[in-house]
Image: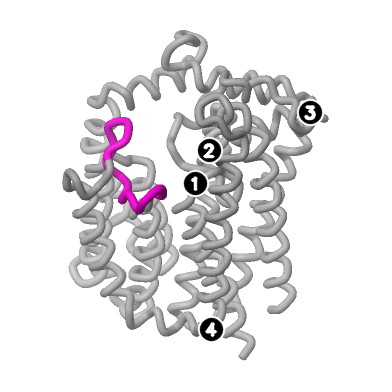
Amino acid sequence: MRSIRISIASIVVILLSLGIVMIYSSSGVYARQTLGDSAYFLFRHLLFLSIGIMAMLFIMAMDYRRLQEYSKPMLIFIIILLILVLIPHIGKSTFGARRWFKLGPFGFQPSEFAKLAMLVYVADFLSRKKEKILSLWEGFIPIVCVMGLVCLLIVKEPDLGNSVLIAMITLIMIFIAGANIWHIVSLGLMAVPALYYLVFRVPYRLARITAFWNPNEDIKGIGFQLYQSQIALGSGGFWGIGLGQSKQKLLYLPAAHTDFILSIIGEEMGLLGTLLVVILFAALIWQGARIAKRANNPFGYYLALGIVAMLGLQAVINIGVNIGALPTKGLPLPFISYGGSALIFNLMAIGLLLNISRVQDL
């Protein structure tokens, strides 16, 4: 599977390179206006990228199967972190959300680690108890209870996007493992009242849904971000207006270097640039699925599937938000958007995927 590893590494390098260029392009004006240094976000991103690459190389060098014995300690550790981040004076509150630990000038978001920890735990559980996954009480309920606890703690931050993402990844993994479809459907039906409350009874989330259905209704208010995103994508046309020439990054489009960086790519590099991003992620998912298919170790099989699902869902959701096909959610575009915790843990996930392939060849 050496050719698959080379292919995945090449795709990730291209995405990372594109991210470096576009983070500087999209954040330079904002950083100079607010922080007095146009390269502020670029330098921080390069630091996070260096840490992520070192973590990825470390994971690639070890035997991923050793993680199986640490799946429960990792889960307990992340649950403790998710509890601690909710405590005032321990977790850092920003814009009404308590999601970060402050480590000097840097922040650490435990919900990003939670995705990786849950992947390892679910992969371990399924590899040991796959024959019991059809059982409601011995297979389905235990894993759903763990998922529910982790998601509940993340929702309390509040961070509905990452909690829904973790739930989706977990359900995809247990569905592929052979869980009873009616158990999953029943869980989904029982979750509807909770989702209704979390979305339609929380004003800012309801406003996002309203803006999604009709972004032109309040283009100077809640629909501003999505409206500006669509202007950016539309302005780019087929070829784009040129690298570094974006108008929307001139303090028009909020979060231009994070959640909406794809819109700046579309404006500067046109439809060709956005299609390139979509094709790269499609190729990454395809090659990752090939690694999962060829894994002869059950733990590696489910772990690879979970990583592919995680990266694929994040990419699909972010792209959907940028083009207006999905309501606004604070999920970055993997390997391209600015964001330290997400970048580091996504690179660690790639390290695990490459590790699974490498061990398979031994």
Q: CA distance from mark 2 to mark 1?
A: 7 Å
Location of the C terminus by quadrant is bottom right
Q: CA distance from mark 3 to mark 2?
A: 20 Å
Q: CA distance from mark 3 to mark 1?
A: 25 Å
Location of the N terminus by quadrant is bottom right
- The amino acid marked with disc number 2 is Thr
Image coordinates of residue 240 in percent, x first then y, are 78, 28
Furthest-right residue in view?
239
- The amino acid marked with disc number 3 is Gly
Where residue 320 sits, quadrant-wise, is top right
Residue 213 lies, with reference to residue 333, above or below; the image says: above
Image coordinates of residue 350 in percent, x first then y, are 56, 65
* Residue 258 tag number: 2
Query: Sequence-wise, which precedes: disc 3 or disc 1?
Result: 3
> Can residue 189 be seen by looking at this rendering?
no
Where residue 276 sits, quadrant-wise, is top right
Numbered disc 4: secondary structure: loop
Image coordinates of residue 91 in percent, x first then y, are 24, 47
- The number of numbered discs placed on residues in the rendered structure image is 4
Query: Sequence-wise, which precedes: disc 2 or disc 1?
Result: 2
Numbered disc 2: secondary structure: loop
Look at 70% across and 43% down and name the residue there: 21
Image coordinates of residue 77 in percent, x first then y, are 26, 67
Q: What span is in magenta?
A: 93-106
* Residue 149 tag number: none
* Residue 240 tag number: 3
Numbered disc 1: secondary structure: loop
Kindly identify which residue carries mark 4.
Answer: 296
Q: Nearer the viewer, residue 235 or 278?
A: 235
Kindly identify which residue carries mark 1.
Answer: 339
- The amino acid marked with disc number 1 is Gly
